[in-house]
């Protein structure tokens, strides 16, 4: 078994961390989970509200009133339950599933959750995150994702620069009283 990996209920678990929140090509929010060695990234589609919450948590923002995941962590603490781990454990028809592993009075309690809620709870409580090997099979090589994003970024900026150069050479500019040029 590789370093950092664990086994729970006979399934190999891979520790992950939240790399960030991004957007797919259709501008839908994606949660980006990355393994500890930063070799693979798992993009999971999430809702806009969840993306904002996770971004705030990652940015270290503090809210004077508890948000839902802060509240859940506090309730668990007051009830004597420990949040042991969050596991993204399954994917079916493109939908990811997660579980929250709690312990109370030496009894394990497993609660189903959306991955975004599990991640937000993990960020609120400092709980470790894992994915199963089955879920990891849907991940992408991190170096490839970075390379693709850089190529897309450069292509986008090259296209923008080309469009701007074409506009600069065209008669689509009108001079103002000061003799300056204004983009239309």
Image (cartoon, rainbow, N blue to C red):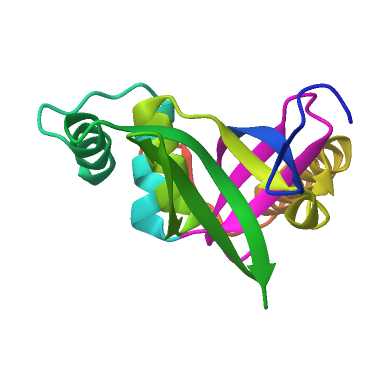
Residue 60 in picture, x, y percent from top left: 35, 21
Residue 9 in picture, x, y percent from top left: 68, 48
Q: Does 136 sit above or below residue 180? A: below
Q: Is residue 40 magenta?
A: yes
Please, which residue is most extreme toward the bottom here? 93
Q: Is residue 133 magenta?
A: no
Residue 88 appears in the rendering: yes
User: Is residue 29 rendered to the left or right of residue 178?
Assistant: right
Q: Residue at x 53, y 55 (%)?
A: 98
- Which picture quadrant has residue 6? top right
User: Is residue 82 rendered to the left or right of residue 18?
Assistant: left
Q: Tell me the quarter of the image containing the N terminus.
A: top right
User: Is residue 36 rendered to the left or right of residue 60?
Assistant: right
Q: Residue at x 29, y 24 (%)?
A: 61
Residue 166 in picture, x, y percent from top left: 74, 53
Total label count?
0
Residue 24 appears in the rendering: no
Which is nearer the eye, 165 or 55? 55
Q: Residue at x 34, y 43 (%)?
A: 53
Please, which residue is most extreme toward the left here? 65
Magenta residues?
A: 19-46
Q: Residue at x 24, y 35 (%)?
A: 70
Q: Main secondary structure of the magenta part?
A: strand
Which is nearer the eye, 175 or 106? 106
Residue 74 in picture, x, y percent from top left: 20, 32
Please, which residue is most extreme toward the front here? 106
User: Is residue 159 rendered to the left or right of residue 128?
Assistant: right
- Which picture quadrant has residue 90? bottom right
Which is nearer the eye, 1 or 176? 1
Q: Does 28 sit above or below residue 84? A: below
């Amino acid at each position: 078994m590789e370093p950092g990996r664990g086994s729970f209920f006979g399934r190999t678990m891979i520790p992950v961390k939240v790399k960030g929140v991004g957007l797919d090509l259709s501008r839908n929010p994606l949660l980006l989970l990355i393994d500890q060695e930063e070799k693979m990234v798992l993009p999971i589609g999430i809702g806009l509200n969840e993306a904002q919450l996770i971004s705030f948590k990652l940015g270290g923002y503090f809210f004077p009133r508890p948000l839902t995941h802060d509240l859940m962590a506090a309730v668990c603490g007051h009830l004597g339950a420990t949040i042991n781990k969050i596991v993204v454990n399954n994917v079916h028809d493109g939908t990811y599933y997660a579980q929250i592993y709690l312990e109370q009075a030496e009894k394990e309690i497993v609660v189903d959750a959306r991955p975004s809620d599990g991640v937000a709870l993990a960020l609120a409580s400092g709980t470790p995150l894992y994915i199963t090997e089955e879920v990891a099979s849907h991940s992408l090589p991190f170096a490839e994702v970075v390379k693709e994003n850089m190529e897309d970024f450069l292509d986008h900026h090259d296209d923008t620069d080309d469009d701007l150069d074409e506009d600069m050479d065209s008669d689509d500019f009108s001079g103002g009283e000061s003799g300056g040029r204004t983009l239309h």
